[in-house]
Amino acid sequence: MTEQSPALDNLLTESRTFPPSETFSAQANATADFYAEADADREAFWAKQAERLHWDTKWSQVLDWTNAPFAKWFVGGKLNVAYNCVDRHVADGHGEQVAIHWVGEPGDNRDITYAQLKDEVSKAANAFESLGITSGDRVAIQMPMVPEAIFAMLACARIGAVHSVVFGGFSPTALRSRVDDQAAKIVITTDGQYRRGKAAPMKVNVDEALEGAESVEKVIVVRRTGDEVPITEGRDLWWHELVDGQSAEHAPQAFDSEHPLFILYTSGTTGKPKGILHTSGGYLTQAAYTHHNVFDHKAGEDVYWCTADIGWITGHTYIVYGPLANRTTQVVYEGTPNTPHEGRHWEIVQQHKVSIYYTAPTLIRTFMKWGNEIPQKYDLSSLRVLGSVGEPINPEAWIWYRENVGANSAPIVDTWWQTETGAIMISPLPGVTATKPGSAQKALPGISAKVVDDQGVEVGKGGGGYLVLDKPWPGMLRGIWGDEERFRETYWSRFADQGYYFAGDGAKYDADGDIWLLGRVDDVMNVSGHRISTTEVESALVSHPTVAEAAVVGATDPTTGQGIVAFVILRGNAVDGGEEAVQELRDHVAKEIGPIAKPRQILVVQELPKTRSGKIMRRLLRDVAENRQVGDVTTLADSSVMDLISSGLKSGK
Ligand code: WT7
């Protein structure tokens, strides 16, 4: 099995459990019999979940898996995703309910009701159609967390256009490669964005990215910071000029259940990001089902807040599609958690009486660092369910979350899933599961996951291996945009004989058969819950003229989960490896990929450890990066290399 990070060792000795309270269980959406019900007839179970949605035409078959690994869910069914997330709530008499309590970083606010959301989405849909955007066209969106980003996504869904949101922190180079890969016709952005109390540019980066981009016909710019931006005549349009005057009436058309809804790029083991493709009916079914049951959401009563950015899958499924399909009232916050002060999140919870809060372990650990006294200053008594996502949560952070945020009573749901799975797969059910700090525990009813060994044989209780998903699920990816071969190769070749989906995560069963996730087993790092491939950072480094070779590893980091540590060999006559050179390389990576990919540390070395076949042995570099005794070096082509690296580092060379 794969090497295991020492920071995760404590996960495996944790044995506390927290059974649900009777009062919580009595009112919970989920009940224990869901598991048996789903096991008895999975397809009937999912058909029942799909009834949560409005279908213009009902499906004739729940699942078609004959062309595996390409699934079809709710075959023959037709629906409009935006209608499901917006219009039907208005039609049902909930037009006055707030859909979004939007909180801007500088302190401005906007409350948007479902009726207003319907108008905004309809106007945007009319505007996009006026530009000739039709079903199947791709629309790239790079925006901060402003309401228009959500309007734009839903307007695309409404007209059958495929959106592709690119995280606001990604560089022009990263945006351009995504725009080109999908041949986006339209790009939507803002003039600038507020970040840590300051307005930062956005549109100028988009301009840089799009220089010579042939597919792009129009760029739509939302005014946010008011900063002046260059406008390219004939290409650029202001959102307010284009959208505001449109009619608020727009008839939603029903699309096939398998109609593409969005593409979202994520890092793989090679340098090139993968465009993960999601479709409509199955995705929305699982998004709504999981949001309802995992968060115990009650429409019209709860105030929900997912702190993710819409640039990631969590924002897609648990800010936009799941919550809105379930008629949620939610907080959407634009900014960083410590602007203007470290109690900002708790202040928002108190003000809006947030009852369900969903965040990432890296932020929980940051809150811990800021101190217990900060959440204590606020009234957090409205909180009744807490969620975690993005990486394994260490028991210490879990307990801190429970005690300092959840008043020792709110159930914590540790939700495992991926961009590729579309929605939550493994998680406790609040009110049903006795939770364990650090374990995501069980596949949800209707979902099937296993821990298997190298041969694909399921391991027993107490055993460790690879996490696989052994049965298709409604929200599963339908492919990698434009690259069928890579789709088969990445996910379906590792356990091809069994037909299992290979998740890329190590996992283990405890004595009760509960699943504990142990981190990636491939060359993908997890930094603050963001997936970054080692190869991507390596390519960025070697694209710098002074770098001859680079190897990158994810080293355990107390706050971010993993930190990026790079080992570089500089070119013969290049500058020495002094501080300035290293800083320049860090900045170069930020420029190539984005600030989230900036290495925490860059070590200049003379050699890299390689096997006889030339493969870099990252395991050994990770030992160095984590200050551990270097492991077995017998498969190295030159076993003295590690001594050279270690002694070079000690002498500061
Ligand atoms: C990878 C997927 C799903 C939204 C956020 C990340 C890791 C995610 C957990 C969890 C342990 C987790 C896995 C997974 N991961 N949630 N609860 N416990 N690990 O989405 O960028 O597609 O990354 O994040 O390693 O494979 P993503």
Image (spheres, helix red, strand yellow):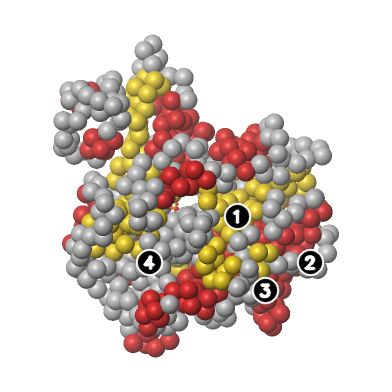
| Residues tagged 2 and 4 counted as in contact (Cβ below 8 A) | no
Quadrant into which the C terminus falls: top left
- Give residue 448's mark: 4
Q: Relative to 180, say whether 249 is above or below.
A: below
The amino acid type found where label 2 is placed reads His
- Give residue 57's mark: 3
Q: Nearer the viewer, mark 1 or mark 2?
A: 1
The amino acid type found where label 4 is placed reads Ser
Q: Which of disc 4 and disc 3 is earlier in sequence?
A: 3
Does label 3 point to a residue whose CB lies under 8 Å from ligand 1?
no
Does label 4 point to a residue whose CB lies under 8 Å from ligand 1?
no
Callout 1: few (<14), some (14-19), or many (20+) C-alpha neighbours within 10 Å?
Answer: many
Query: Disc 1 versus disc 2: distance between alpha carbons?
Result: 21 Å
Query: Disc 2 versus disc 3: distance between alpha carbons?
Result: 20 Å
Which residue is at the far top? 573
Q: Which of disc 1 and disc 4 is earlier in sequence?
A: 1
Measured as percent of width and height from the top left, residue 107 is found at 59, 60
At 39% across and 47% down in the image, what residue appears?
493
Callout 3: few (<14), some (14-19), or many (20+) C-alpha neighbours within 10 Å?
Answer: some
Q: Relative to 245, say whether 582 is above or below.
A: above
Measured as percent of width and height from the top left, residue 644 is found at 20, 22
Q: Nearer the viewer, mark 4 or mark 1?
A: 4
Measured as percent of width and height from the top left, residue 503 is found at 38, 53
Circle 1 is placed at which residue position?
A: 262
Q: Nearer the viewer, mark 2 or mark 4?
A: 4
Left or right: 383, with 56 as reference point = left
The amino acid type found where label 3 is placed reads Thr
| Residues tagged 4 and 1 counted as in contact (Cβ below 8 A) | no
Circle 2 is placed at which residue position?
A: 250
